[in-house]
Amino acid sequence: MSSASALDGGQVTINLAALRDNYLTMKDKSGAAETACVVKADAYGLGLEQVAPVLYAAGCRSFFVAQSREALDLRALLPDVVIYVLNGLPTGAAAAFAAANLRPCLISLAQIKAWQAYCLTEKTALPAALFIDTGFNRLGLSEADVADLAQVSDYFNGWTVSLIASHLACSDEADNPMNRAQLECFLHMRQQLPTAPASLANSGGVILGEAYLFDMTRPGISLYGGSANGDDTALKPVVHLHAPLLQTRSLSIGDTVGYGASFTAPHDMQIGIVGLGYGDGFMRHFGDRPHSRASLMIDGQPAPILGRVSMDSLAIDLTDFATLPAVDTMVEVFGQHQTIDKLAENGQTISYELLTSLGSRYNRIWIDQ
Ligand SMILES: *Cc1c(COP(=O)(O)O)cnc(C)c1O
């Protein structure tokens, strides 16, 4: 993409050196456990093709994705790593999984039987994970399923349980009693299953402490600079989003701004129009006052978003600026002066959604410094 396109549209800068540092930080916090990386949804919107090789070079040898299609993309990039597919084994997909050396996270008795049937036919004990539900009630084997498995040992003939995994619902809240309850449930269910390495902790789980680490951790958001528990200062910002100031204008008291004329100037004001909108994946509700208190940043000074977010632009309040910023100034959406978590919190969303919503229209650059 030509550099001219960056002048009237937004720019995403992804710092691969910071990504590497965050991986090493999570590895350090994971102690003796292996640190696997979660790279679903195009590595949380950062670009699987750029992100996965950096994590590999930093030492990561096991990865998690959600969908088999993501797994095939990753396999093409990294031929020799372990890849787990969180959404399970689609009906009829065992041969395709085996051909690409993918490991399904088996989430039902039917999936276990399908994997086993394939392995028995091919006479090869292929690895797969048992994914168990410990209270999240999303995907996974229920307590009743696990009790079934424990009674009928036949289920485990002919294939290899390479991992027993579950997922925490409230790991971003260290004091939430749900964490302890899920940990106990996990320990209890694991006892009824064949001996295999275990994994419970996502980013937030790693911070909960040693009891949650088991044999493998599975951080995602923390690699990409999002804080799992609101204040993880050890992590570095990886993604920086900027958008250009297209025009400035003066408002008189009573003037309105944008679609629906939803903002009315309570006094004379200076505003700026920024080339960033919901067509870029910047959520419309960021302009939804008073629910949103979101600001963009110019030279470290906040410029609150005013009125509704349009498809291609939004308005910011520049009244408090001693000198009016020049047209073409690149306005920071998040990155250096405003963390992604701060913007997310002020806009009633989460860093995960901000990253995975980064639109295809941005000029994306990957730096390594
Ligand atoms: C997405 C996901 C992760 C990673 O979670 P983060 O909060 O981003 O660290 C780990 N495990 C499972 C099952 C997931 O779905």
Image (cartoon, rainbow, N blue to C red):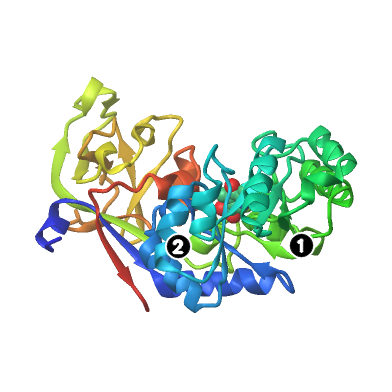
Mark 2, Cα crowd under 10 Å, few <14 / some 14-19 / many 20+, is some
Residue type, label 1: Pro
- Residue 258: image tag: none
| Image quadrant in which the C terminus is located | bottom left
Residue bearing mark 2: 75
Nearer mark to the viewer, of 1 and 2: 2
Query: Residue at (28%, 42%) from the top-left corner?
Result: 317
Mark 1, Cα crowd under 10 Å, few <14 / some 14-19 / many 20+, is some
Place residue 4 in its image quadrant.
Answer: bottom left
- On whether ligand 1 comes within 8 Å of the CB at mark 1, the answer is no
x and y percentages locating residue 165 in the rendered image: 71, 52
x and y percentages locating residue 130 in the rendered image: 71, 49
Query: Which of the marked residues, 1 or 2, is nearer the chain's N terminus?
Result: 2
Query: Residue at (13%, 46%) from the top-left corner?
Result: 247
- Residue 47 appears in the picture as rendered: yes
- Residue 362 vs residue 125: left or right? left
Dot 1: element: loop
Dot 2: element: helix
x and y percentages locating residue 295 in the rendered image: 37, 46
Residue type, label 2: Arg
- Residue 239 appears in the picture as rendered: no
Q: Which of 302 and 108 is in front in this view?
A: 108
Q: Nearer the viewer, residue 29 or 330?
A: 29
Q: Residue furthest top?
A: 260
- Residue 335 vs residue 342: left or right? left
Residue 192, compared with residue 215, is above or below; it is above
Query: Residue at (77%, 62%) from the top-left corner?
Result: 214
Residue bearing mark 1: 197
